[in-house]
Image (cartoon, rainbow, N blue to C red):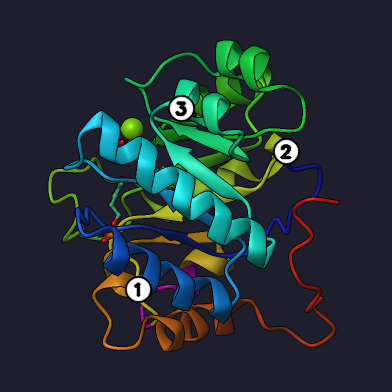
Amino acid sequence: MTSRWRQGGVYAITADLTDTALLLDRAGQVLDAGVCLLQYRNKQATAELRAQQAKELLALCRASSVPLIINDDWRLAAELGADGVHLGGEDGDVALARQALGAQAIIGASCYDELSRARAAVTSGASYVAFGAFFASRTKPLARTCGLDVLQAAADLGVPRVAIGGITPDNAGPLVEAGADMLAVISGIVDADDPAAAVRAYARHFTRPGASTAPNNASE
Ligand SMILES: Cc1ncc(COP(=O)(O)OP(=O)(O)O)c(N)n1
Ligand SMILES: Cc1ncsc1CCOP(=O)(O)O
Ligand SMILES: [Mg+2]
């Protein structure tokens, strides 16, 4: 289980692929390009396929020292010994997940455009808070929307802020300027002809003079 992770950069999320070989191939490209976290999210797969894909992704992530976060299901994360879980408003209680997964687990919470939800999540033990959608999302067209002011106002929460929703390398700049520590991206990476090049294009927003280029250090 993770004790250290790079709390800034590109947070890649998988697409709804039932072809596991394709999923792993894409994930491998993305991991090699240098993401800070990978989230396994598959809304189409059966529970059995999700468990299998997550297990195979975890092995790949371990080899790259990138933490694997399981979307929605902290029980699956616990069962596999994954590095953490991402919970939305309908996905269960952050405090319960923290209790089950332990102090080292990375627990993310969707906060949509609600600062009060973010404060409550941090109090319950969230490791990061996610806001969005900031732009129209091809993956989740009906996602609730959020403005840059919320991201800015969340500066004092004491945990990293994640931005999500329709983010492209071209529209990401203002999010990072507003304080986003991580950019969570699905279609901008998985639909790209070259997913690794797409990751690098997002990552440029975090390249500042003197910024650390230290690799992930997930399992130390
Ligand atoms: C990093 C990150 N942020 C937000 C979400 C969205 O979670 P949720 O609101 O539960 O929606 P689904 O992803 O389950 O459709 C996320 N998965 N990851
Ligand atoms: C899961 C989720 N929650 C808000 S928007 C979104 C989808 C993000 O995907 P994309 O990067 O393709 O817009
Ligand atoms: Mg969810």
Q: In the rendered image, which residue does mark 1 sit on?
A: 189
Q: Is residue 124 in view from this perspective?
A: no
Is label 3 in a helix, a strand or a loop? Answer: helix
170 versus 137 height, above or below: below
In the rendered image, is residue 107 in sight? yes
Q: Mark 2 points at which residue?
A: 1
Count neighbours of disc 2 (C-alpha within 10 A) and say few if under 14, some if 14 to 19, many if 20 or more.
Answer: some
Tell me where the magenta segment starts and ends, as one range: 170-174
- Residue topped by disc 3: 76
Horizontal side of 76 relative to 167 (left or right) equals right
State the SS at label 1.
Answer: helix
Q: Which of 163 and 81 is in front in this view?
A: 81
Q: In which quarter of the image is residue 107?
A: top right
Mark nearer the N terminus (2 vs 3): 2
Looking at numbered disc 2 in the image, what kind of residue is underneath it? Met
- Three-letter amino acid code at disc 3? Leu
Vertical placement of residue 40 versus 72, above or below: below
Mark 3, Cα crowd under 10 Å, few <14 / some 14-19 / many 20+, is some
Q: Residues within 10 Å of mark 1 (few under 14, many from 20)?
A: many
